Image (cartoon, coloured by chain):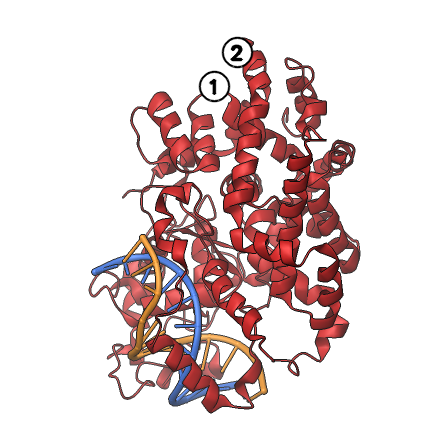
Chain colours: A red, B orange, C blue
DNA sequence: CCTAATAAACAAT
DNA sequence: ATTGTTTATTAGG
């Protein structure tokens, strides 16, 4: 209901769900109305009977008779698809490629006959638990913070991470050795958990302008810090690590950063026939360059290439999706558009993150991002984006002014679709802007500064203690991804900080800004894709 | 051994 | 109470 029916129409595709022919084949994204759902529904039941499954015996509903069926094509009562796959389908079905948990539920109920009747009845059906479980477990699903009122976060699929990679088994370490111990520890920690005494955590609410880190890492970071202090052994586990070296790191990076550098990732991965290593380096460079004043040069380069790549990006996405599961053909045009839009959406929430921890959004986007908030009278969409970008108070203020409604950004964001970006770009020129741009530097710097401060106090401190050089040393040695990560971020922050402190460089924007009224032009030229 | 489903314990909101 | 995370158990390949 809440759905802005705009493009959504309805995700109700109906995997015809038949005994063995996999629905995956192709039919999937077709706008299939609720045709045969009713008819098929009955068939699904089978052994499911007491799906609830009493606490003692887990096996209850499971395969049982179903599995035995026909060469084992269908493993679950609903078909051969795993929960993960179903979820993927659900997410992909969404025009924006993102769904909230509730929406996923909804999709399940609507699209998969088996769940049709099980939807609303009891909220805590086992399958919902499983859905959640899968969402959390698999790295192919990423959670992005939802700016809307108190909505649950968006779930979307990780373009890269999904392929086959499961959850980032961080430190799977000790299992073999002292499983008991591990268990004990786990239980102990869980039951006892007075830990996480983080003094600020609760108090920071006012400062929470930025949701520090919506996702997984935050929670973990604490633990990790502990780990660092404790110096977890876990040595033996990774023999391959050495050889793998970068790759695992990257992977981890993906997991943690993906939200921030999704775009860059997409570029690199998509565009490149380049060997992985190079790609990685590119990434790093990319991230670093961001900060360097010279970035403009590179940006040119990138923008040039990005033009091509952008196209490809769609492919990359698709391919990854395809790999992840079937999804298949489906409309090209819509896909393209939706992809773009999805990208834009990526940039929105992601940029927020990127603002916090400057990592590696594509330069042009950065520019836009940076410029965006400044633009006063851009219009609703802008404000919505701005809202996303700023997230929180500033956004609210803007909202109040620009959009008295105060309606959830969600709705605004939805319908906009592809049109958002183009409209956004060229606008830059405006009388006020000249003035505002002058002042632009100020707000931006402020933002950056804040980001530095708020971004990651812990990291900063660690950075101060263990500056750049160390990281390189440790990196290969210990291969601690987390460490690496942190250090990396530290680097960023450190650099920024220093730069800010030095005041030597007047930001990247300086060079570009000098001609206030024109930059728009330059930008426009930058975005090859704009004119379409 | 690995994957996946399922149940359940909890942290946050 | 919902949403997320995480651990454990179990079954199947």
Q: Height in image: A380 above or below A304?
A: above
Q: In the rendered structure, find residue A376 and report the number of the disc placed on it.
A: 1
Q: Residue A432 carries which label?
A: 2
Asked if one can make out residue A99 in the rendered structure from this viewpoint, the answer is: yes
**A304 vs A280, nearest the viewer:** A280
Q: Where is residue A473, by image quadrant?
A: bottom right
Q: Outermost residue, front direction?
A: A465
Residue C8, quarter of the rendered image: bottom left
User: How much space separates mark 1 and mark 2, taking CA atoms?
Assistant: 8 Å
Q: Is residue C12 left or right of residue A273?
A: left
Quarter occupied by residue A233: bottom right
Q: In this view, does A97 lie above or below A185?
A: above
Is residue A40 visible in the rendered structure shown here?
A: no
The C terminus of chain A - image quarter: top right
Q: Residues within 10 Å of mark 1 (few under 14, many from 20)?
A: some
Q: Is A425 rendered above or below residue A236?
A: above
Marked residue chain, label 1: A
Q: Which of A515 and C9 is in front in this view?
A: A515
> How many numbered dots are placed on residues in this image?
2
Q: Do labels 1 and 2 share a chain?
A: yes
Q: Which chain hosts label 2? A: A
Q: Residue at x 70, y 27 (%)?
A: A526
Q: Eyeballing the image, is A55 above or below A501?
A: below
Secondary structure at badge 2 equals: helix
Residue A486 in the image, given as x and y percentages of width and height: 61, 58
**Residue drawn at (67%, 78%), measured in percent from left and top?**
A238
């Amino acid at each position: 209901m809440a759905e802005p029916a705009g493009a959504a129409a309805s995700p109700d595709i109906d995997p015809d769900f038949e005994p063995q022919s996999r629905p995956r084949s192709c039919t999937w994204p077709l706008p299939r109305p609720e045709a045969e759902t009713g008819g098929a529904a009955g068939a699904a039941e089978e052994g499911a009977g007491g799906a609830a499954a009493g606490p003692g015996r887990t096996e209850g509903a499971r395969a049982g008779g179903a599995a035995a069926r026909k060469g084992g094509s269908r493993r679950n009562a609903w078909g051969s698809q795993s929960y993960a796959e179903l979820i993927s389908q659900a997410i992909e079905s969404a025009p924006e490629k993102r769904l909230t948990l509730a929406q996923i539920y909804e999709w399940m109920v609507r699209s998969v006959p088996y769940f049709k009747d099980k939807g609303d009845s009891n909220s805590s059906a086992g399958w919902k638990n499983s859905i959640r479980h899968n969402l959390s477990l698999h790295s192919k699903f990423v959670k992005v913070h939802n700016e809307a009122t108190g909505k649950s976060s968006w779930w979307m699929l990780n373009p890269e991470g999904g392929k086959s990679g499961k959850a980032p088994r961080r430190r799977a370490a000790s299992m073999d050795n002292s499983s008991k111990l591990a268990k004990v520890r786990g239980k102990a920690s869980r039951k006892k958990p007075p830990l996480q005494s983080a003094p600020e955590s609760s108090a920071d609410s006012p400062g929470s302008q930025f949701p520090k880190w919506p996702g997984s890492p935050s929670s973990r970071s604490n633990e990790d810090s502990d780990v660092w202090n404790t110096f977890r052994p876990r040595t033996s586990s990774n023999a391959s690590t050495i050889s793998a070296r970068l790759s695992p790191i990257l992977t981890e990076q993906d997991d943690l950063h993906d939200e921030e550098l999704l775009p860059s990732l997409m570029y690199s991965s998509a565009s490149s026939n380049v060997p992985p290593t190079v790609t990685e380096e590119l990434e790093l460079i990319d991230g670093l360059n961001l900060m360097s004043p010279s970035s403009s040069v590179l940006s040119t380069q990138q923008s040039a290439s990005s033009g091509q790549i952008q196209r490809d990006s769609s492919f990359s996405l698709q391919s990854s999706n395809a790999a992840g599961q079937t999804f298949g053909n489906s409309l090209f045009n819509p896909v393209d558009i939706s992809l773009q839009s999805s990208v834009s959406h990526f940039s929105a929430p992601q940029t927020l993150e990127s603002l916090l921890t400057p990592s590696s959004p594509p330069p042009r986007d950065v520019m836009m991002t940076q410029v965006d908030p400044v633009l006063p009278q851009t219009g609703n969409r802008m404000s919505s984006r701005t809202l996303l970008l700023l997230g929180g108070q500033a956004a609210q203020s803007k909202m109040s002014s620009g959009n008295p409604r105060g309606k959830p950004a969600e709705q605004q964001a939805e319908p906009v679709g592809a049109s958002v970006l183009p409209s956004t770009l060229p606008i830059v020129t405006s009388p006020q802007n000249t003035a505002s741009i002058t002042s632009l530097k100020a707000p931006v710097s402020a933002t950056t500064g804040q980001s530095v401060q708020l971004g990651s106090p812990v990291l900063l401190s660690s950075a101060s203690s263990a500056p750049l050089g160390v990281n390189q040393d440790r990196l290969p040695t210990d291969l601690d991804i987390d460490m690496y990560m942190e250090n990396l971020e530290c680097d960023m922050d450190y650099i920024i900080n220093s730069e800010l402190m030095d005041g030597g460089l007047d930001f990247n924007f300086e060079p570009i800004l000098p001609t206030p009224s024109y930059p728009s032009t330059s930008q426009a030229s930058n975005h090859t894709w704009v004119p379409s």
